Amino acid sequence: MSDSSMDHHLFLILVLAFPVVHCPITSVINANGDTEVDLSSITSHITHLEKQVSSLQHQFESDLKSTMTDLVSVRSELKASREEHDQLREDLNAKCQILKLASDELNVTRSEISRLKEESREVKTACVANVHSLTNVLEIVGAITTNISFEVSLSHPQHSVGDKDTLKFDKVRVNSGHHYHKDTGAFTAPVSGSYMLWASIRLTEPNSFINIYVHSHNKVIGHGHAETSTSTPSVATLLTVTFLRVDDKVWFTKHSGSTVIHGDIHASVTSIYGGALLRPH
């Protein structure tokens, strides 16, 4: 609303609000019966009316000024309220964006948890298969009439080993005939025949791998490999059958990969290697 329009409305309000001033006019009757107006009385009333109009004008201007001041104050408060509302809206939008990012991260985390659960099930299945494989090996070894066999593990939880180093496990679990030498890590065939050789090396280092070789006559006759993800351990398994002559030596090496091999933990065997004679000939 413009200022001129506002003034017009305020003037109408004031006119309606103030009562009409009645100025009695004194009159006299002359001898002929005519009414003569007392000019002095009219002048006095006009003067009185002008004073009242002037007073009303001053009061109107004062009220108008006060109203305009209040209007400016209200406009300022309204502007401040709008600015505060805009700021609150910006803060709310920012918080909504943060909440969306958090929701996206939560969905990613849930997907990662599902993937890790699936990997855990796969590793569990592989471990069960390895246990069955080792059980079969032990059954075969137990059925051999000529008792030539060995199997060793680590007596401590961790064992440091470099690339191409010979594995020298110190805990001798089986050494029938005493043909395995833990000082050198080598097995010497006492008779010619077919031998079964095996290894199961546990790897728990995250995002790592390991390659295990078994050697004879300075050549590789068996190979085992394992890889790990960020949090799932793995096992490198090796199983092979080869012909050995008398005094042939067999040894296992860590060819490449992790520099740490995990041994027995709380009476639980985690890494082993060994061999047995299947049939002499």
Image: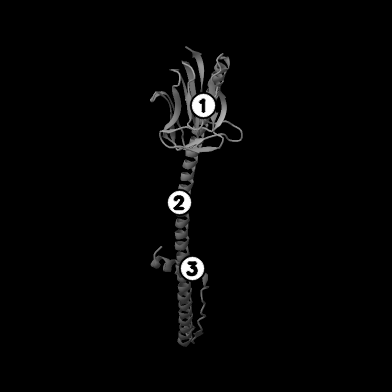
Q: Amino acid at mark 1?
A: Tyr
User: Does residue 53 sit above or below 151 in this rendering?
Assistant: below
State the CA–CA distance, disc 1 to disc 2: 70 Å
Crowd around label 3: few <14 · some 14–19 · many ≥20 (10 Å): few
Q: Amino acid at mark 3?
A: Ile
The picture quadrant where one finds residue 4 is: bottom left
Label 3 residue SS: helix
Can residue 155 be spotted in the picture? yes
Dot 3 corresponds to which residue?
13
**Identity of the residue furthest to the top in this view:** 281
Dot 2 corresponds to which residue?
94
Counting residues from the N terminus, which is met first, the one under dot 3 or under dot 1?
3
Residue 247 in picture, x, y percent from top left: 45, 21
The residue located at (47%, 42%) in the rendering is 105
Q: Which mark is residue 60?
A: none
**Identity of the residue furthest to the right in this view:** 267
* Contact, mark 1 vs mark 2 (Cβ under 8 Å): no
State the CA–CA distance, disc 2 to disc 3: 49 Å
Give whichever of 54, 200 is nearer the camera.
Answer: 200
User: Does residue 2 sit above or below 201 in this rendering?
Assistant: below
Crowd around label 1: few <14 · some 14–19 · many ≥20 (10 Å): many
Dot 1 corresponds to which residue?
180
Residue 22 in picture, x, y percent from top left: 52, 77
Counting residues from the N terminus, which is met first, the one under dot 2 or under dot 3?
3
User: Does residue 209 sit above or below 147 in this rendering?
Assistant: below
* Contact, mark 3 vs mark 1 (Cβ under 8 Å): no
State the CA–CA distance, disc 3 to disc 1: 119 Å
Label 2 residue SS: helix
Which one is closest to the eye, mark 3 or mark 1?
Answer: 1
Residue 160 in picture, x, y percent from top left: 48, 39
